[in-house]
Image: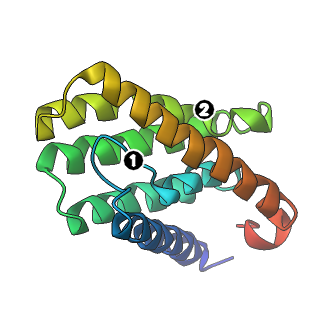
Amino acid sequence: MKNRPVLYLTYAAMIAALYVVLTMLANVFGLANGSIQLRFSEALTILPYFTPTAIPGLFVGCLISNVASGAALPDIIFGSMATLLGAIGTYALRRQNKWFAPFSPILANTIIIPFVLKYAYGIIPIWFSVITVAIGEILSCGVLGMLLLFSLSRYRRHLFSV
């Protein structure tokens, strides 16, 4: 197929746009930033289980979301990197058991984001941020993400044939 790069870019752009919309929705409820976070958009970090085009889409979507929500520069950089690392990990673990899909995003965000919250926003203690970020990631990636994975698995051939 001659237009395959265009198709990859389109998939990535759609995933980025969806990530931004879901983050802004969480932001309306005050759940997208701060020590207690439940970003609905983090459920999308299971998409690399189906297609590698989700990796740049998730990274760009997180980057745009962080800029649009007025995040501090360290949050824009390292928060986006945490999502990127989580997405790469999901892709790397895709051939393992499907239950491993949310593991990397949960781990990456639980390790990186508490330090971002401390150094960018002065939110302390770190142990509290580790707990709250882990709970938010388990809910968004582990619960919502796995619901999404099982829902999309049925239509995998039609949606992710690229």
Which residue is denoted by mark 1 in the rendering? 37
Question: Which quarter of the picture shows residue 160?
Answer: bottom right
Q: Residues within 10 Å of mark 1 (few under 14, many from 20)?
A: many
Q: Which residue is mark 2?
A: 103
- Total labels: the figure holds 2
31, 82: nearer the viewer: 31
x, y (%) of residue 89? 55, 35
Residue occupying image coordinates x 70% and y 32%:
100
For badge 2, the amino acid type reads Phe
Q: Look at the numbered disc 1 and give the secondary structure of its residue.
A: loop
Say which element carries label 2.
helix
In the rendered image, residue 41, in percent from the top left (x then y), is placed at 49, 59
Question: Is 104 drawn above or below residue 143 in the view shown?
Answer: above
Q: Is residue 113 above or below residue 149?
A: above
Q: Is residue 111 visible?
A: no
Is residue 142 depicted above or below 21 in this figure? above
- Residue 141 seen in render: yes
Q: Amino acid at mark 1?
A: Gln
N-term-proximal mark, 2 vs 1: 1
Which tag is nearer the camera, tag 2 or tag 1? 1
Q: CA distance from mark 2 to mark 1?
A: 17 Å
**Residue located 40% across and 69% down the image:** 20
> What is the quadrant of the N terminus in the image?
bottom right
